[in-house]
Image (cartoon, rainbow, N blue to C red):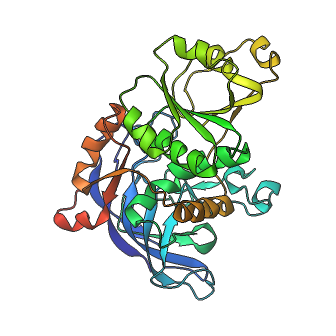
């Protein structure tokens, strides 16, 4: 038996999102049913809803920054109880057998993790994301949201938060380390907050100084405009780690020169076009280029607990279901500080359903 719930879906590539309904499976023995309260909007939602990555399965219900309350559990569930505050991030299953899954790195599952939306479950049924009023997920892929974080501010942590927490901790950002966050958008603002809480000396590198006041408020020690050529001379050989949150092709050589001996430039904003770099700028100071994507379930829970302990949530603008298409356009224009979050309760504001 299935349950039908309201949702917001892209009916086809580049079509506006419209109200619809979706069917949820009946919770199995190890499933958790969640009443979704808030769903964050990630730029990757836009890429996928508009099929810019040529992987679209339509109709598509986006959303992988999900925060809500457990409404029912299967007979074998041991991790959660009805009423618990929980979240769901970017994937809802994996093979559970490969070396990476067994190491708690399910995001790098060698057989491919199952995306929260725009993917298929192991039984072939499509996955639907958080732009809906409810979701059913295996307990092993559900995160506990500590009481110290508002649910609305926790939702973006399930993608933006872990996307920055993972490289910052993997590359040992902390006391005595000089860390630069390149870009001050939805990802970048989380990077500043987390790097500061880890104890690093934090510098923001942004195209202009327009968000300098925010950056300093989030915990940055320094703020530089990359449009100013003197930035690159003043900061040469300076950083232990640069985390690039900008999904655009950059002058990599210019940024590599900012790295100190053994420094690393980590990309979390992934450009669509290939990059090239002269090996000299890597060999010169034994520098490295790397890339990173989200984190496994264990690390994501660690991130949520860390953020709660340090009073970290996303800076958000809450919107209604009927404002999502407008919000997509604003994200493209970088007109948000710093993350849109859908108040799922606003599904009740309109009873009409577009089939």
**Tally of numbered tags:** 0
Figure check: 46 above or below 125:
above
Residue at (77, 24) in percent of width and height: 287
Horizontal and vertical percent position of residue 60: 41, 51
Horizontal and vertical percent position of residue 238: 68, 24
Q: Quadrant of the N terminus?
A: bottom left
Left or right: 37 in relation to 197 = left
Residue at (31, 35) in percent of width and height: 335
Q: Quadrant of the C terminus?
A: bottom left
Residue at (49, 57) in percent of width and height: 312
The residue lying toward the viewer, choosing from 186 and 92, is 186
Figure check: 67 above or below 43:
below
Left or right: 155 in relation to 138 = left
Q: Quadrant for residue 101, please give it.
A: bottom right
The residue lying toward the viewer, choosing from 170 and 192, is 192
Residue at (35, 72) in percent of width and height: 4
Horizontal and vertical percent position of residue 54: 51, 35
**Can residue 24 be seen by looking at this rendering?**
yes
**Can residue 129 be seen by looking at this rendering?**
no
Q: Quadrant for residue 46, please give it.
A: top left
Horizontal and vertical percent position of residue 3: 39, 76
The residue lying toward the viewer, choosing from 26 and 243, is 243
Q: Residue furthest bottom?
A: 75
Left or right: 217 in relation to 308 = left
Figure check: 203 above or below 278:
below
Figure check: 349 above or below 253:
below
């Amino acid at each position: 038996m299935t349950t039908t719930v309201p949702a917001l879906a892209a009916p086809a590539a580049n079509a506006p999102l419209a109200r619809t309904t979706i069917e949820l499976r009946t919770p199995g023995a190890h499933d958790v049913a969640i009443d979704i309260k808030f769903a964050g909007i990630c730029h990757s939602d836009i890429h996928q809803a508009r099929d810019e990555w040529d992987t679209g399965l339509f109709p598509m219900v986006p959303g992988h920054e999900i925060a809500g309350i457990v409404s029912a559990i299967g007979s074998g569930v041991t991790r959660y109880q009805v009423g618990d505050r929980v979240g769901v991030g970017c994937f809802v299953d994996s093979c559970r057998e490969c070396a990476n899954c067994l190491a708690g790195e399910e995001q790098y599952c060698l057989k491919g993790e199952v995306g929260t939306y725009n993917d298929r479950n192991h039984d072939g049924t499509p996955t639907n994301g958080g732009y809906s009023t409810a979701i059913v997920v295996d307990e092993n892929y559900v995160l506990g949201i500590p009481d110290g974080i508002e649910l609305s501010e926790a939702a973006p942590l399930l993608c933006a938060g872990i996307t920055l927490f993972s490289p910052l901790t993997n590359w040992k950002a902390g006391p005595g380390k000089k860390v630069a966050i390149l870009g001050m958008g939805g990802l970048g603002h989380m990077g500043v907050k987390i790097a500061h809480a880890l104890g690093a000396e934090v510098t923001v590198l942004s195209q202009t100084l327009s968000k300098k006041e925010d950056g300093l408020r989030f915990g940055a020690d320094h703020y530089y405009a990359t449009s100013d050529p003197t930035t690159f001379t003043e900061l040469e050989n300076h950083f232990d780690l640069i985390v690039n949150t900008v999904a655009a092709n950059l002058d990599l050589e210019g940024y590599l020169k900012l790295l100190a001996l053994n420094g690393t430039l980590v990309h979390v904003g992934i450009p669509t076009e290939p990059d090239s770099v002269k090996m000299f700028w890597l060999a010169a100071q034994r520098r490295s280029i790397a890339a990173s994507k989200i984190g496994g379930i264990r690390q994501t829970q660690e991130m949520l607990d860390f953020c709660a302990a340090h009073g970290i949530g996303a800076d958000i603008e809450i919107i209604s279901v009927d404002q999502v298409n407008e919000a997509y356009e604003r994200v493209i224009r970088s007109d948000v500080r710093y993350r849109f979050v859908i108040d799922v309760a606003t599904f009740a504001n309109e009873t009409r359903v577009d089939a």
